[in-house]
Image (tube, rainbow, N blue to C red):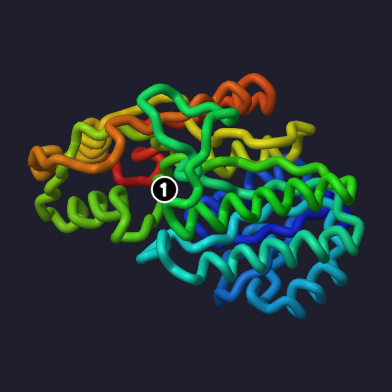
């Protein structure tokens, strides 16, 4: 294929990454993705077997493809990921990606960050707000990669944007995560017990997050950009809406339990909407229907 916009993607088999193929193709990208997975879908992506923790692999892939664009989504977000030493491996792989992207003529890159880098407050979080990155290994490594990428890209005339993701839900989500657990239990006609339902989060459907990253990548916007809806929904209402759409709301039960989490975590998405010009397509109702879990 000889599209004019060649891109290398990491994390293309993850919850967000697996939704990238369609918006990237629609935007005219020729898509290459590194993966350790077998039997990847025939969705227009050129799959390359390789390990991001192997510097020689990154060097070889970059040399073969010579992508103009790089979208780095790969990171571990399951299990004990907040404290895991694997975060340092992803930090190192991100640095290597930048190094060989530059050596092969790369021009525009977008890296994925997290809202957990912020110092939380009750009002919407803006890109210019104070950070609190040393609370976990995960946030420390995410932010450190961002800092290194900013300096590196400035020195090497590479355009960089950093998308901070808030709360994600999507198709075939891990059963250890909230949405995956709710859908799994309700699919089995089992009761779902929701504790601390008063907590409010900024949930965004994985297809919208993928679309937002593609729009950001395909724009000239640089710096940090919140990838979020700009609206908070309580865990109570979120879980109940899933139950209603599955016709099993009577199986969703609530228990009041105190939590040490901030009562509200919501982002300000002004840059995403006004500068990137991304239009959010899904709410919880339409997202659950899209996941084919509705009645």
Q: Nearest the camera: 19 or 121? A: 121
Badge 1 is on which residue?
Answer: 170
Label 1: element kind: loop
Foreground: 38 or 230? 230
Q: Name the quadrant containing residue 256.
A: top left
Residue 294 sits in which quadrant? top left
Residue at 19% x, 55% y: name it: 185
- At a point 59% along the width and 65% down the height, the residue shown is 90
**Left or right: 105 in relation to 75:** right
Q: Specify the quadrant that holds the N terminus.
A: bottom right
The residue lying at 62 percent from left, 34 percent from top is: 225
Side of 124 relative to 271 (left or right): left
The answer to whether residue 241 shows anywhere in this view is: no
Q: Describe residue 48's horizontal placement relative to residue 255 as left or right.
A: right
The residue positioned 74% from the left and 32% from the top of the image is 221
Q: Position of residue 30 (x, y in %)?
A: 78, 54
Identify which residue, 54 or 187, lies in the foreground. 54
Image x and y of residue 112, in percent? 60, 49
Residue 212 visible: yes
Number of numbered markers: 1
Image location (x, y in percent) of residue 278 = 62, 28
Packing grade of label 1 (10 A; few <14, some 14-19, many >=20) is many
Q: Quadrant of the C terminus?
A: top left
Q: Position of residue 200 (x, y in %)?
A: 30, 31
């Amino acid at each position: 294929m000889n599209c004019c916009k060649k891109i290398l993607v990491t994390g293309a088999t993850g919850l967000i990454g697996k939704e990238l193929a369609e918006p990237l193709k629609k935007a005219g990208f020729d898509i290459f993705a590194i993966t350790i997975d077998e039997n990847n879908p025939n969705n227009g992506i050129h799959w390359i077997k390789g390990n991001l923790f192997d510097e020689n692999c990154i060097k070889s892939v970059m040399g073969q493809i010579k992508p103009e664009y790089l979208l780095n989504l790969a990171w571990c977000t399951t299990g004990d990921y907040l404290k895991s030493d694997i975060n340092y491996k992803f930090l190192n792989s991100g640095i290597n990606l930048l190094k060989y992207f530059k050596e092969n003529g790369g021009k525009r890159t977008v890296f994925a960050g997290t809202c957990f880098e912020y110092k939380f407050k009750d009002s919407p979080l803006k890109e210019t707000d104070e950070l609190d990155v040393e609370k976990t290994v995960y946030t420390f490594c995410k932010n450190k990669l961002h800092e290194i990428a900013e300096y590196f890209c400035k020195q090497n005339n590479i355009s960089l944007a950093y998308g901070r993701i808030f709360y994600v839900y999507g198709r075939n989500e891990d059963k250890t995560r909230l949405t995956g657990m709710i859908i799994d239990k309700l699919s089995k006609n089992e009761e779902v017990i929701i504790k601390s339902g008063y907590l409010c989060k900024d949930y965004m459907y994985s297809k919208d997050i993928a679309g937002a990253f593609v729009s950001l990548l395909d724009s000239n916007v640089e710096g940090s950009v919140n990838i979020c809806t700009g609206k908070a929904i309580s865990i109570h209402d979120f879980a109940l809406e899933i139950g209603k759409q599955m016709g099993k709301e009577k199986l969703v039960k609530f228990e009041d339990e105190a939590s040490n989490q901030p009562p509200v975590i919501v982002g300000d998405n002004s840059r995403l909407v006004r500068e990137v010009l991304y239009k959010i397509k899904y709410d919880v109702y339409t997202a659950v229907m899209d996941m084919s879990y509705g009645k």
